[in-house]
Each structure stands twice: as structure tokens, then as C-alpha cells.
Amino acid sequence: MSEVISSLKPAQEYENDSELTAFDDPAAIVAAIVISIVGAVVMMTMPVLIGALADNLGFDEQQLGWLASSDLFGSFIAAILTSFLIVRVNRHYIAIAGIITALVTNFLSAQTHDFETLICLRVLAGVGGGVCYSLGVGCLAGSHNTARNFSLLMFALTFIGAAGLYLVPILSGSWGVAGIYYAFCIIFTICLIAVPKLPAFNSEATDKVAGNEFSVQIPVYLPKLCLLAAASFYITVGSFWTYIERAGVDGGLSEELITNTLTIGTLFSLLGCVLSTWLSNRFGQSKPLIAALICMAGAMTLLAIGINPVVFIIVNFTFNVLWLFTDIYQLGTISNLDHSGRYTALMPGAQGLAQALSPSVAGFILSQNVGYGGVMVLAAAGSFGAFAVYTFVYARLRKLTPEIADSR
């Protein structure tokens, strides 16, 4: 017999609010979103933070690359740790441990100019922040209207990220890199206020205590396949987002067109947040997710065939709309399969690992003189791979439990 996990019926299947859990409390949802955002704040401001490190501490390009990767590697470790602890340990303790780790390591980073010491601190800082982010999305997994809740998270991340990209250069100009790290310390300290609002234990335990019997059995390989699909999709994100500016230059596009398209295009990611909730309320999460992935694969293929101003603009806007759109549905899909949050907590790790490795693979492709068309073929393959996996997962769920397959 295949190993199975318990999953709750989607929110639209409940007849009254008494069947919902502590994870559906608005205060718990807000707390989970706040902790997720704080945990991701360093990664969201990484481009300008790296610039500040170069300007203030004089690190070379290779050193800057290692520093960026160290935070990302720490987040990957954190996802694995959080996945193990989230179903075993009081979530308040996990959150406090992550916050304190991030607080201490960012404080020490502000006083460190030595490269070797700083890179060790940034790995630990990545662990602290990554624990907060993974725990936050794991807590949202315990709620029932996951598409709406993850849409709120991505919407907030977009706004906070934009604000961070604006404020970090100001902090750097006034107080140097130390001012940036001290600001991170303040943010993590404030985050402690949200911890008591998080449910202490996983949703399955909460349901049993409440006496609610409305779980179904899901083969454990399905959420694992969702993690594989998420990693595959982030091959698209990592390869496209790293090299799209260079691809535009190689295609003979003007610097003004490239800059304006990339800047304005990021605003369209907010449209993805709005569309995800609207579509999930009408079609569930699985069908729009599968459609988005095949559209993303098509857009990357179009770019691989040839770059001109019209194609460059269309593909960039398509990417920005579908990136967060797909993220929301990926998180929602795996959450509906496992409300304990164990597998959802691994999602940032799967995404981060693929996003870290894919630029290296794309760089190897370029070193073989294939050109940027080859990079976009890699990007298309990542989305198509995710499309194939999610199509299989959806087909299996339609046979096992149609209410979860088409849940919102």
C-alpha cells in the first residue's frame, strides 16, 4: 500500500464556519504573512544590497556572487529544517529561533568587513530568515482558502519588495552597509509581535482536538511531485530572469526599451495576484495552473525563435503576470494536499535551489556558443516539465478526490 498523508477538504466543501480551524483566523493569516515577508526581506532586496557591498566594502564580482548564494543556500537549509520541525515542535518556538538567528547574524554582519567571516554569517542569516519564510507559508498551508491567502502574501511581497529596493540605497548612502543590516535587525525584532498569533501546532492536530472529522487520504508521492514541478518551473525563472537583459542587448534592442520594459513589466506581477483569486473562485487552482505553465513555455519558445521589440515586450509582460500567478497556485496546490505544512515549508527550498543552479546551467549553454536562444529553450523546458508533472498530479487527484483536484 502506498504511503498516504491526511488532507482537509477545501473550504467550499464546508457547510459552516465551525468546521474551519485556527489557521483560518484572520489574525493567524496576517501573522503568517508578516513572518513570511520579514523572512524574505533580505532576498527581496538582494540586487541593491549586493551593490552596496560592492560600493562600500569593495568586494569583486566573484565574492559578491558567493555572498548572494550564501543567503540562498541558508534559505535552502532552513526549508529542510522547518519541514522536519513544523509537524513536531511548537511553531512559536520555531519562529522565535528563526528570528533570533536572523537578528544576531544581521547585527554581526553590520560590524564585519572580512569576506570569509561575512559569508559564514550570511549563511546563518539565510537560515534564520528562511525559517521564518518557510514557517509562514507552512502556516498558510493550514488554512483552507489557500489561493486567496497566498495571493495576499504575494501581493504584499511585491509592494514590500519595491519599497525595499527604493529604501536600501538611501540607507546605504547615509550609513553604509551597516545601516542596511541594522534595519534588518529592527524588522526582525518587530516581527516578534506576530509570533503569538500563529497557531502553535499543525492543522491536523488542531482538527483532531476540535473533533472535526473531514480529512481525506492522499498518496505522499503527490506533494513530492509538486515540489519537483516547482523546482522545474524555477529553472524557467532563474534562467530567464538572469539573462533577459543580456538577451535583449544581444538582440540589438535599445537600452531604453530594455530598461523601460523590465521596469514597467514588474508592475504587471500585481495583475497576476488579482487574476489568481478571480480564476480560482471559478475554475479551482489546478486548471489555471496547468494553463499558465503551458503559456509560459510558449512564451519562452517564442523568445528562443527570435528577439525583436514586440516579442521582447510581450514575453516580459507575460512572464511577470504568470510568475506570481504560478507561484500562488503552486503553493495553494501543495497546501491542499497536505495541510500540516510539512511539504509547503519545503517549497521555498525547491524553488531556491533551482533558481540558484539554473543560471549556472544557462551560463554553460552560453559558453558552448549556442546563444541566448539556447537559454530560452532551457527556460521553456522548465515550464513544460512543470506542466507535465502537474497534469499528472491533477489526473490522479481527479480519480482519488475530485473535490481537492478542483478546489480553490
Image: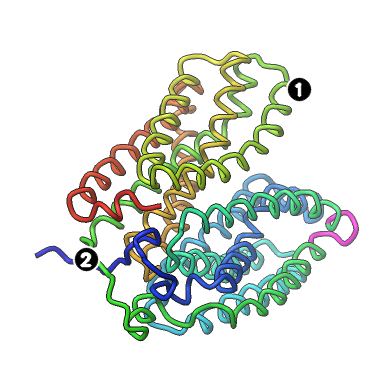
User: Of helix, strand and loop, which one carries label 2?
Assistant: strand
Local crowd size for mark 2, using a 10 Å CA cut-off: few (<14), some (14–19), many (≥20): some
Q: Position of residue 368 (x, y in %)?
A: 44, 25
Q: Which residues are magenta?
A: 172-177
Between the residue at mark 1 and the residue at mark 2, the CA separation in whole angstroms equals 54 Å
Q: In the image, 19: left or right of 94? A: left
Please say which color scheme the image uses: rainbow
Circle nearer the N terminus (1, 2):
2
Nearer mark to the viewer, of 1 and 2: 2
Task: Residue at 62%, 55% (x, y): give it.
Answer: 43
Identify the image quadrant of the N terminus.
Answer: bottom left
Q: Can residue 403 be seen at all in this image of the molecule?
A: yes
Q: Decide: marks 1, 2 in contact (CB < 8 A)?
A: no
User: Of helix, strand and loop, which one carries label 1?
Assistant: helix
Judging depth in this view, the residue of 349 and 147 nearest the camera is 147
Type of the residue with mark 2? Gln
Toward which corner of the image does residue 257 lie, by quadrant? Answer: top right
Label 2 belongs to which residue? 217
Judging depth in this view, the residue of 1 and 305 nearest the camera is 1
Label 1 belongs to which residue? 256
Q: Position of residue 15 (x, y in %)?
A: 37, 66
Local crowd size for mark 1, using a 10 Å CA cut-off: few (<14), some (14–19), many (≥20): few
Q: Position of residue 145 (x, y in %)?
A: 46, 59
Task: Residue at 72%, 67% (x, y): give it.
Answer: 184
- Figure check: 301 above or below 153: above
